[in-house]
Amino acid sequence: MVAKKAVKSEPAESTGPQKTFTLTDDQTGKSWKLPVLQGTQGPEVIDVRKLYGETGMFTFDPSYTSTASCKSRITFIDGDEGILQHRGYSIQELTEKSTYLEVAYLLLYGDLPNQKQFDEFVHSITYHTMVHEQIHFFFRGFRRDSHPMAVMCGVVGGLSAFYHDSLDIWNPTHRETSAHRLIAKMPTLAAMTYKYSQGLPFMYPRNDLSYAENFLYMCFGVPAEPYKIKPVLSRAMDKIMILHADHEQNASTSTVRLAGSSGANPFACIASGITSLWGPSHGGANQEVLEMLQQIGSKDKIPEFLKQVKDKNSGVRLMGFGHRVYKNYDPRAQVLKKSCDEVLDDLGVKHDPLLELAQELERIALQDDYFAERKLFPNVDFYSGIILKAMGFPTSMFTVLFALSRTVGWISQWKEMIEEPSLRIGRPRQLYSGPTARPYVPMSKRK
């Protein structure tokens, strides 16, 4: 067994007097003082790690909406103020001035790279984009009409069978190699998944293209003729990737961390994140936007549709508006709306009924006091779905593109967790509500 590598310890949460929270039992009058931790931003946190040992009680928090499951330095969100920051940099500034690979470096290593660091990082990612040739045969085991996310779950998890030379998670070099391989190969696998579903030949990556350009080339290029990449589309794809790169402790990221806490290899952990992302309440939201638009059908039916949305008993939901975290305008949506307009203008999309319907729905909803009062603004899924459809991606590929973009966030969160000195396997507790102890009754005597 390989010994765990020493990692740099983190500073204490607080350098001043320890603030505490007092918990009192109403029946016995007994009290316990729980430490209160303070991050650099965000609400204070009551430390309940010793609660069970001292009180014999657990906390009950279904869906963990009031529980900090970890300590992280990667991403900060203030949903009330509409703030999203990566390592302290606003998402607006990063999408305006940076590139996806520069943001990937930032998420992985904590700071923006200098030119030498960036060139070396880009070189490493570029020369890891090809996949083992036998993976081509792996695809043939799937039906052509398989959902692309089902294929991605299999091929990403299968990478550990091809790249087992970098699976020692306690070795820093192995961790970095696996991280680079995942970031580099995910676009290749995503493009192969798309091509396979269309019955088209796989396109090998090109080292002379940028990350976003290479992905578009592998998706839409064909061997019979050169593929001309539109700068507006590659910029929009790069922005979509940046905007989906990480989003704190969401369902899929928490899944990756929980899987990784057991010591599972990074390829398996990222595959677990993909399975969680596949759920329509998480990564499938932009696909549901397009399905909603198809359900509406035409512009003249929008008022009746919104009337049903306002009726609590109708069960009709307005997809692509509002967000569980953001109680203000989704900062990512503000960035993507501009890209959406640029893409539609560049492609000359003026007579696509579905896209025209989306634009009209946005216009009407934004002018409606009902949605404004409830802060139901268009979110990132609304605009990303429109852009991806305009580019030519089928809705079944939308969540795959989300997974491609989120991979760097997942692997950064996984890496941060593995390097945490106090790492322990995740083990949530439960409030048991089943039968108490009862004797076994032989089958012949059961009623």
Image (cartoon, grey):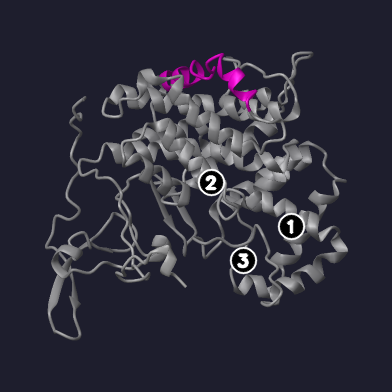
> Can residue 209 be seen by looking at this rendering?
no
Q: Which residue is mark 1?
A: 292
x, y percent for residue 435: 36, 71
| Mark 1 element type | helix
Structural distance between the alpha carbons of marks 1 and 3 = 16 Å
Marks 1/3 in contact by CB < 8 Å: the verdict is no
Structural distance between the alpha carbons of marks 3 and 2 = 23 Å
Q: Residues within 10 Å of mark 2 (few under 14, many from 20)?
A: many
Residue at 72%, 37% in the rendered image: 393
- Label located before the other in sequence (1 or 2): 2
User: Which mark is in front, 1 or 2?
Assistant: 2
* Amino acid, disc 1: Met
Give the answer, above or below, for where 261 lies relative to 186. Answer: below
Hey, which quadrant is residue 281 in on the image?
A: bottom right
* Amino acid, disc 2: Leu
> Can residue 132 be seen by looking at this rendering?
yes
| Mark 3 element type | loop
Q: Which of these two is toward me, 370 or 28?
A: 28
Residue at 62%, 62% in the rendered image: 377
x, y percent for residue 65: 41, 63
x, y percent for residue 162: 46, 19
Q: Residues within 10 Å of mark 1 (few under 14, many from 20)?
A: some
Using residue 396 as the reference point, say whether residue 407 is left or right of it. left
Q: Residues within 10 Å of mark 3 (few under 14, many from 20)?
A: many
* Amino acid, disc 3: Leu
Using residue 408 as the reference point, say whether residue 311 is left or right of it. right
Q: Which residue is mark 2?
A: 277
Residue range of the region highlighted in magenta in the rendering = 119-141
